[in-house]
Image: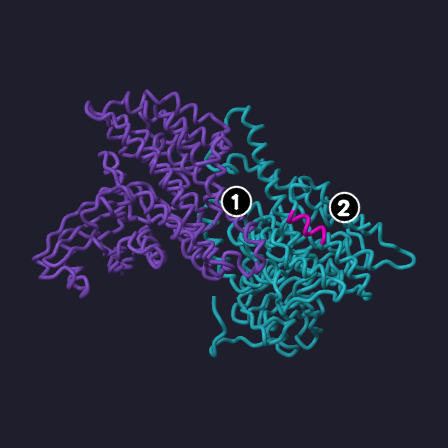
Chain colours: A cyan, B purple
Amino acid sequence: MQVPSAASRYQTLDLAAVPSLLAGLPDVRARLGGRPADWQIREVGDGNLNLVFLIDGPSGTVCVKQAVPYVRAAGPSWPMSLERAFFENAYYQAVAPHVGRRIPEVYHYDPELYCTIMERLSPHIILRRGLIAGNVYPDLALHMGEYVARACFFTSDLAQACERKMSGVALFAGNQALTRISVDLIFSDPYLASERNRHTSPQLDGLAREFQRDAGLKIAVARFGRKFLTQAEALLHGDLHSGSVMVTGDDTRVIDPEFALYGPIGFDLGAFFGNLLLNAYAQPGHATDSDDRSRQQAWVLGQARQFWLAFRRHFLELWREAGSEGYPGMLFEQAADAAQIDAARHAYLEAIFADMLGFAACKMIRRILGFAHVLDFDAIPDPLRRAECEARALRLARRLLTHPAEFASIEAVIDAASGGIQ
Amino acid sequence: MQVPSAASRYQTLDLAAVPSLLAGLPDVRARLGGRPADWQIREVGDGNLNLVFLIDGPSGTVCVKQAVPYVRAAGPSWPMSLERAFFENAYYQAVAPHVGRRIPEVYHYDPELYCTIMERLSPHIILRRGLIAGNVYPDLALHMGEYVARACFFTSDLAQACERKMSGVALFAGNQALTRISVDLIFSDPYLASERNRHTSPQLDGLAREFQRDAGLKIAVARFGRKFLTQAEALLHGDLHSGSVMVTGDDTRVIDPEFALYGPIGFDLGAFFGNLLLNAYAQPGHATDSDDRSRQQAWVLGQARQFWLAFRRHFLELWREAGSEGYPGMLFEQAADAAQIDAARHAYLEAIFADMLGFAACKMIRRILGFAHVLDFDAIPDPLRRAECEARALRLARRLLTHPAEFASIEAVIDAASGGIQ
């Protein structure tokens, strides 16, 4: 890992610099076709942390993503390590053999420019925007459940020798700058009078204050914060919300794994699950005279349920196929053992389920009371209506954290969410 | 980290090479006094992995410990990374600010010779030998409980910023060769027909076969094996049995941390606790006409109990003193919160207690049915008598793993051990 020095080639790319960079890469140049002068380039980054350029050539297209040395949403006053581009690329490399076309193809990584040249996803849109628009993606939950199952299973101790996993742990333990963001913004700031927080005010002032004074809630959040830092089960995407997924009617792609780290599998699951719940809670805010969005809401909740079930099915299947590898070095020869082993696997999946709910709740709260919010709510112009939706989401999240025993099954969670939304 | 290359200075030290090495270190030379020709040197390594030299000079003494590139007990046919010396030194450095005189002072580390020059502990003896001899060490449990509490607390997320802990995790994730030994010898081999296993035969043939066929037992062991590799709570010694502790009547020192890694706190606790139980179970085998060893046995079990209680008291005290750091970034201003926070801390300690028992049991089993045995049993010449002691220890260990709910308190464990011994 490096930080840019005077001798480094690092410069922030612009519309002029991108073509000359790409012209120097024969494979990429061939993919685009024609000459650099023929290429159409635009900058489309709408995230918090990066520049994103889309380049159209006569024969093909590519996407260029570059890290800038500060949090883009906050400006140069909040500096941010460029290394995140390194970890994003390392994550793509690590999971690529296991997840097929669920991630974009990476054509080139430039370690000095902290810049990735990769497949341009088209006509994909950001899932979050599609869900807000009321679109339906029939395979979404199945794709995402299988994705998390495969990415996590194959990077866990269930499928890797300890040496290989320890090397992965060592590598991603370098991703400290982005882990610090998660620690602060998810597990700490929303429960403090942090200047970075905001919420729909004055409507949610009371709830925000209540959350900051709820010792039981804060203790539960702190427990999940510790879990996040200690439970190195698998390589995680680290920020798997609906803004990190791009979709078409039948395709699903995972992007932006710059927060990648080894951690609890429930953290990735909870990010996606929690963001589906947030979208479901936001749906009434997007109602029109002709569509009260209740159908869309039910579909989103159904996807949340299917997502967990698909993850669970695929993870168990991979584990069963792994045979004795899943219990390293143990021989279970007797047929009678099979039932006990399967019970043990189910118990492990139940623990992951509880983790998913806890992390989902932490992420729901931070998106309503913390620094970075979600468009699902922000796009509701009437603050009163928005606050109603947000308050319902906050109440379920708190309940998930303070009364976990009430949510022993996926049905219990979906029922509670459906009831809270009505 | 390096591996010895042709260009490296690495050579196996001998009685001739040690003085010239030490003569080149002004501080060590001054400590010994006189000239190299005045120094008395002997090699005393009785462990599995290293050369150990004791050097006496006119003014002082030092100890030199060097890693050799194979498992000493097995010979050059079992090669072993020299890096363990690097990790041993790194562990000493990491815990030195927190544990006072419970570890030897390190004078010099030579990264090319994989050799540590350190305080010679005298008149200390290895604790295991002292316990077998029937000695009593009044402060043992208090010293060791406080040691584990301080070494683990200060290297955990409860006392360190996540960046610092992640750097530690990254460093010790390099200790793969010795972690592989633990994974194989503790969590796998004893339950397989491994050539490396041995046991008192034929007396324990039946139990060994039972253990290899007990699916519930193997599932529990596999769960602790996964915990060992995933639950990075604190920097561990990694091999904290009674052979890694040196004692006098009133002093206690921890040595040989070459298995150091980030892992579950219960693993270090379980190593020490389990080895005290092994010693207690071995005591009847050392009975003489004048001493049935029942008093010594009761004392050892009392120390096991005190060890846990001392750890618990110190760990809680450190956590309470850390104040809001223990719940990073959380503000708990209201007096009413204190009781809830303390309940959460106790719940965390209960989980560590359960881990301690599980890991203790794994370690007890591997010392009786696996590759590396303990002198506590090996020094009992009559195989029948030895097998009786070993069988009792094995039965408690299996019960701890398969019926953990029966052992919710330290008293329940000590009672069961006392009963099983009679």
**Residue B260 point in image, percent of width and height:** 37, 50
Query: In 3D space, how far apart are the residues under numbered discs 2 and 1 (Cα atoms)?
Result: 35 Å
Subunit of label 2: A
Q: Is residue A412 toward the left or the right of residue A67 in the image? A: right
Residue A305 magenta-highlighted: no
Q: Is residue A197 toward the left or the right of residue B287 in the image? A: right
Give the amino acid type for the residue marked by disc 2 in the picture.
Gly
Q: Which mark is residue A302?
A: 2
Q: Which residue is mark 1?
A: B347
Q: In this orientation, which residue lies closer to the viewer: A218 or B341?
A: B341
Q: Residue at x 37, y 39 (%)?
A: B273
Q: Is residue B71 visible?
A: no
Q: Residue at x 32, y 31 (%)?
A: B298
Q: Which mark is residue B408?
A: none
Label 1 neighbour load within 10 Å: few <14, some 14-19, many 20+: few
**Residue A363 point in image, percent of width and height:** 65, 56
Label 2 neighbour load within 10 Å: few <14, some 14-19, many 20+: some
Residue A19, relative to residue A101: is it above or below?
below
Query: Label 1's element?
Result: helix
**Residue A133 point in image, percent of width and height:** 81, 59
Residue A397 magenta-highlighted: yes
Q: Is residue B218 visible?
A: yes
Query: Label 2's element?
Result: helix
Which span of residues is magenta-colored?
A395-402
Give the amino acid type for the residue marked by disc 1 in the picture.
Ala
Q: Residue at x 24, y 52 (%)?
A: B66
Q: Residue at x 38, y 28 (%)?
A: B394
What's the magenta bit mostly, secondary-structure-wise? helix
**Residue A296 point in image, percent of width and height:** 82, 52
